[in-house]
Image (cartoon, rainbow, N blue to C red):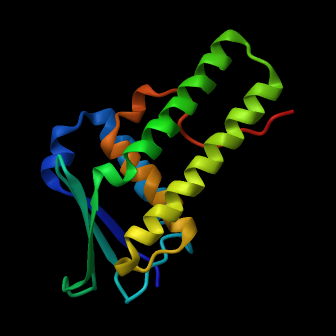
Amino acid sequence: MSLRDIEIDPSTYRAADEVRQIEWEANIQELLEPGHAVVAHGGTLLTIDHTEQQFVLTLKDDSGAIVASAALLHHTLRDGIREYVEIVRQIAGLDQEGGGVARLEALDMAKKATHDRIARTLKRELRPLGIDHDTARRLFTLLLSIRVDTTRLHGVHGHRRIG
């Protein structure tokens, strides 16, 4: 079954500036594209609560009843996020310096591989939600943008076509 809506906890959402809120809404809409936000258990709403220590993701059905829930400690993603952000920064540096195509291709492949690795971690850690790999990839993009101000990271969205 596919999700129909995703909500970020109101205190986190209100604390963010308008640019970040717009980015979160875009990431949510990408996740909710038909056939992408696939979850088990018949849940239609995913709520994301963000604290200093963790994300708590709760899957609810149409009546608002909790179907599944999972806590994701920030340290679980810490190293992957650091690696991903560093790759993005290197790509942005090459863009500004006019770096070589081969180096850009290698960094873009590293970015994709890191994204896939983190998606596998999310799929495993969020097993109670029953998400597939594609959903986990897109969910990582949303969680990353909540955890890190990605509006300040040039090149964080998408992968490049080189050549």
The residue sitting at 34% across, 69% down in the picture is 5
- At 35% across and 80% down in the image, what residue appears? 128
Residue drawn at (17%, 51%) of the image:
51
**Percent from the top left, x then y, of residue 66?**
21, 83
Q: Quick check: 154 above or below 28?
A: above
Name, please, the residue furthest toward the left. Answer: 11
Provide residue 145's location: percent of width, then percent of height. 38, 43
Residue 91 sits in which quadrant? top right
> In the figure, is residue 51 to the left or right of 136?
left
**Residue 96 vertical placement versus 131 (above, below):** above
- The residue depicted at 44 percent of the width and 37 percent of the height is 82
The residue positioned farthest toward the right in the image shown: 163
Q: Quadrant of residue 126?
A: bottom left
User: Which residue sits furthest top?
Assistant: 97
- Residue 151 % position (x, y): 41, 31
Toward the viewer: 11 or 52?
A: 52
Q: In the drawing, does residue 129 fall left or right of residue 136?
A: left
Q: Quadrant of residue 58?
A: bottom left
Say if 123 sits above or below 16 in the image.
below
Say above or below: 1 vs 86. below
Assign the C terminus to one quadrant of the image: top right
The image position of residue 67, as x and y in percent, is 26, 86
In-front residue for pair 62/72: 72
Q: How many marks?
A: 0
